[in-house]
Amino acid sequence: MKIVRPSFDIMFLPDGEEMIRNIEAAGRTCYKSEDKITSDSARKFVRRIIASGHESVIEHGSATVRFVCDRGVTHELVRHRIAAFSQESTRYANYSKDKFGNEITVVKPVFWDEDSEAYRLWYEAMEQAERLYLDLIDKGAKAQEARSVLPNSLKTEIVMTANLREWRHVFKLRCDGAAHPQIREVMLPLLDEFARRVPVVFDDLREKFSRDIEKFRQLAGDVE
């Protein structure tokens, strides 16, 4: 059994400056103010429309992200309707095969210390799930049948594409203190990276969650 931390990989995100220039060009169509476009007007324009709540304009930009997380997190992600998703299928992924190392991979819970009783019990449950899964496969069960014993902690991969307005909505919900710790664990650093790469669009959210971003950054590290 392998234990990993969640992670993300930004698969598609156009140059941030180019993206906000495109957003400005699209947005100014509403007001027929294209004549006001200058070499440095895009940031001011985008900042103004976000402040005014006219966020439909930023739907002209989009990004694609691959998440490595547990299946509990993906159950929350796919509730965001204005997005496209492609996820690793436990019907077809047979974890007893060599390509998966003949083992399952699970995601380490962020909320339990490794020396705690709760973590010990979780670890035992994961080992038992792996053993039963592999036993079922060995006795002739198909992957889509044996998956019935796999846990929520099972590592999965999901690719999500959404426009920038929807990404803002996702970050507002999933970075909030009321969100599940494991989805915050990936969303807070992702928000930080989006804000770094796309001017203006995510600055206010990064500022709002700055303390939590730093907290979860300190949790990053390798898992044996």
Image: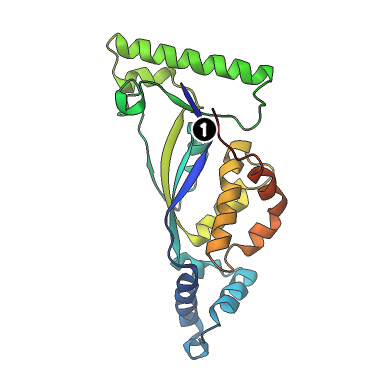
| Farthest right residue in view | 211
- For the residue pair 217 and 81, the one nearer the viewer reads as 217
The front one of 147 and 1 is 1
Residue beneath the point at 48% across and 23% down:
151
> Is 71 in front, or is 217?
217
Q: Left or right of 44: which side holds 145?
A: left
**SS label for mark 1:** helix
Residue 174: x and y in percent read 60, 46
The residue positioned 61% from the left and 73% from the top of the image is 47
Q: Callout 1, which amino acid? A: Gly
Residue at (35, 27) in percent of width and height: 100
Q: Quadrant of the C terminus?
A: top right
Q: Residue furthest bottom?
A: 35
Q: Nearer the viewer, residue 222 or 130?
A: 222
Horizontal placement of 189 versus 87: left or right? right
User: Circle 1 is placed at which residue position?
Assistant: 72
Picture coordinates of residue 179, whole percent (x, y): 64, 41
